[in-house]
Amino acid sequence: TAHISFATMKPRTRDERHAMRDKERLERDRLANRTGSYHRYEPVKDPTAVAPNCPSYAKPVERFVTTEDVAAIQHKERAQDYSKVMEKHEGRRQARYKREEERWAALDAKERAEQMRLDRLQADPICGRKNVGGAPFNIVSQNGYG
């Protein structure tokens, strides 16, 4: 049979193997051996830090709100929410009150109109009678009723 040769790796020394256990060293070696070769990154001290000239920058004292301030802020928010709810209830109450007043006024006006109609019918003796002509005499005989 033919002899197959393999590309053999050069064996590493003990120091090299121990150095490979270090994560920093391992990452550096992987970066150097990757496709695209070694790329040098700019070091960033703190990626979450905000620059002092940035609009979102706050001094350390300003970042933390004391407990009394939080309680006052929450109390103010609850008071505002309560006043909004009370204004809504008051608006509904006023609308219902006005609607009820208008309903009672309409009922009173209807009752007054009915009473005026009854008074008018009682005042005129001829309007109140049924089956009687409107003339003050008998139309057929031309005689008066009296």
Image (tube, grey):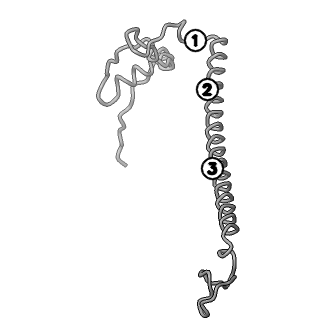
Q: Taking 140 as reference, is 30 left or right?
A: left
**Which image quadrant: the C terminus?**
bottom right
Quarter location, residue 89:
top right
Q: Nearer the viewer, residue 115 or 145?
A: 145
User: Mark 2 and mark 1: span between their CA atoms?
Assistant: 24 Å
State which mark lies toward you, 2 or 1: 2
Estimate the spatial distance between the alpha carbons at disc 1 and disc 3, rounded to whole Å: 57 Å
Q: Which residue position holds label 3?
A: 102
Circle 1 packing at 10 Å, graded few (<14), some (14-19), many (20+), is few
Rendered position, 27 above or below 110? above
Q: Nearer the viewer, residue 75 or 43?
A: 75
Q: Earlier in the sequence, mark 2 or mark 3?
A: 2
Give coordinates of residue 142: x percent, y percent: 59, 90
Residue placed under numbered mark 2 in the picture? 80
Q: Residue furthest left?
A: 36
Amino acid on which disc 2 is placed: Gln
> For residue 64, which numbered disc appears in the image?
1
Name the amino acid, label 1: Phe
